[in-house]
Amino acid sequence: MYASHVRGSKLELAALSGAIALALVAGGAQAQISQSAERKNINRVGHTDLQGRPSYMPNVIDYPDGRTILFAGTHNNAPVPVAGCTAPALPNPLNNNVCEFSGTVIIDVTDPANPVEKFHIPAPGGGQGQAQSERMCLGSQLPNAAANGLVGKVYMMRNVQGGSSSGYEVWDVTNVSAPVLASNLLNIRSTHKMWWECSTGIAYMPGSKNSVLVAGTPLWYQSQAMLIYDWSNPKAAPNYIRTFGLPGGEPTSPTGMVGVPNSLHGAISAFEHPNASQRLVRGATANDIIGNRIYAAWGVGDDGVMTIIDRKKLLPAAYGGTWVPATPNSLDSPTQAELIGPASPTVGYLTMSAQQGGHTSMPIFGVKPPSMQFHNEFATLDIMVLTSEATADGVNGRCNEAPHPAFLVDISIENSMSAPPGTRVEHDPYQGPMVLSTMWIDPRFGARYPRGNYCTRGARFGVHSSEENFRNPLYGKLTVLAYFNGGVRIWDIREPYNPSQVAFYVSESNANTAPAGYMSNNAEVDNRGNIYIVDRNGAGLDILQLFGCPAQIVAGTAPTCPAIN
């Protein structure tokens, strides 16, 4: 993901300064675009309808020529069927209104006030597959760029979930109006939100090999495990490294189909974090650095697990790691000791309650809470924004499940196998990570507005995901959370024991929105501080900017902001 948000430092600083200047005046002179009546300290500056396609995930990259391009993955249902197209296909106005199954929409967001849709890449499989997630890399950042002819190119990796083409694809998207399929990986089950390290080409991808189609491959009980591939040459098929997962999901698990652990939703590698070489706050060895960690969320909406993975122990020597397979079959079928325990790459393990799952695990390093600076230890923390997805869909009101908040988790102590990083060796070797606080919106908050209580509006209510860009100017200060029909919520996380909501924007339905109503799905923040939120029920893409006190927090000029309760 390194190249997805990289630009020269001078250009980045200039863009950030311009965004903050615009944001600070936005409260008094709103952009010439309609605004939701349900918002605070944030305005919509741009919008595009994404052709009415139900969107899952926005992701942004700075092109070599200075353009900022957004890619929006979609689901394969049509919120509002269109005459002339067989559902779930929708007409593509960029292709003479040809009916196309939803895939990936490419949007030029260089000017946030005037986003321009450039192309739609349909998902393969005749409407049976969907391409919800994507990651991008500049070709020049990938290994052997010159030798492989990658310099000046831009590549997008996306998943295809379901159907005969289930797997992953890489596209050459250098020309955003004429992308070309560069390579693919088929016969993969349960694909979803991958992570692509641009400087190494290593991809950490939810899924597992389909043993029916890949002869001789043992079938994982946990179909959405972690596949690890070397996709450093986007023009060629990737090289398989190994499959990793939670204990009990491996093919030789003694539990069989009983007690199968929940699925991997997504992993975030810190290998390309701006401070990758810096020690973790309780790092005891040379390997305990930010860049040697992968953070994984498992379980989505219930029975969740968050794991912290030692990247070097995960990878074999050919990729800079130390893993030596225990058996000839360990690549496809590891022993349980290779998944959990002192010899495994798993260095942190947090089990969540039965009603909460692991959707997104976004680490924040080196937080110095002002309230803790008088303490003589743990005055600096490594924390995580951990979200649990609300998953229930109902007919009238969608709170047909337990409440689903986001959590701030202290990950300063990863385990108690040694002291340090723990305070002492404990009976439980994985004692360490701990929830400090929750970020929860009372559904009755919505009753302040005409649309009413969030539990009675239709569509889901509860948290879904957070932003995932280490280089966005909000990082370490504010986090952006999507709450489905609760909109997008901005939280001040500088005091992890007491986070406070400082801004929100609740989108509105339009002609493309499904009858259940709008549903803000995923959010991302670019290097300029623009916030992107996409709608799962067809209402499109909103581009937002903070103003007032939250914008001053980003600029470093506001010590605190009044909490919105």
Image: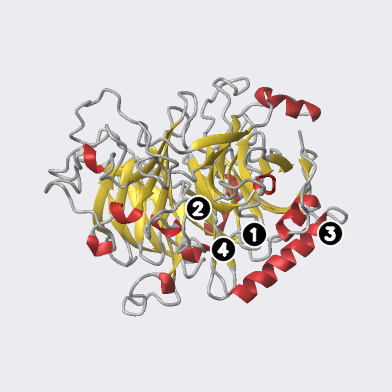
The percent coordinates of residue 310 (x first, y second) are: 35, 51
Dot 2 or dot 3, earlier in sequence: 3
What residue would you read off at disc 4? 69
- Residue 104 horizontal side relative to residue 504, left or right: left
Residue tagged 3: 25
**Mark 1 lies on residue:** 473
Q: Nearer the viewer, mark 3 or mark 1?
A: 1
Measure how far apart labels 4 and 3 are at the Cα level.
25 Å
Q: Quote the CA–CA distance across marks 1 and 2.
A: 22 Å
Say how many tags the image has: 4
Q: Nearer the viewer, residue 342 or 159?
A: 342
**Mark 1 and mark 4: Cα distance apart in space:** 18 Å
Q: Say if 7 sits above or below 169 in the image.
A: below
Quadrant containing the C terminus in the rendered view: top right
Residue that numbered label 2 is attached to = 281
- Residue 244 is situated, as x and y percent measured from the top left of the image, at 28, 44
Q: Residue at x 35, y 71 (%)?
A: 143
Amino acid at circle 2: Val
Mark 2, Cα crowd under 10 Å, few <14 / some 14-19 / many 20+, is many
2 displayed left or right of 32: left
Residue at 25% in and 55% down: 241
Identify residue type, mark 3. Val
Q: Amino acid at mark 1?
A: Pro
* Horizontal side, residue 176 vs residue 9: left or right: left
Percent x, y of residue 117: 59, 59
Residue 141 picture quarter: bottom left
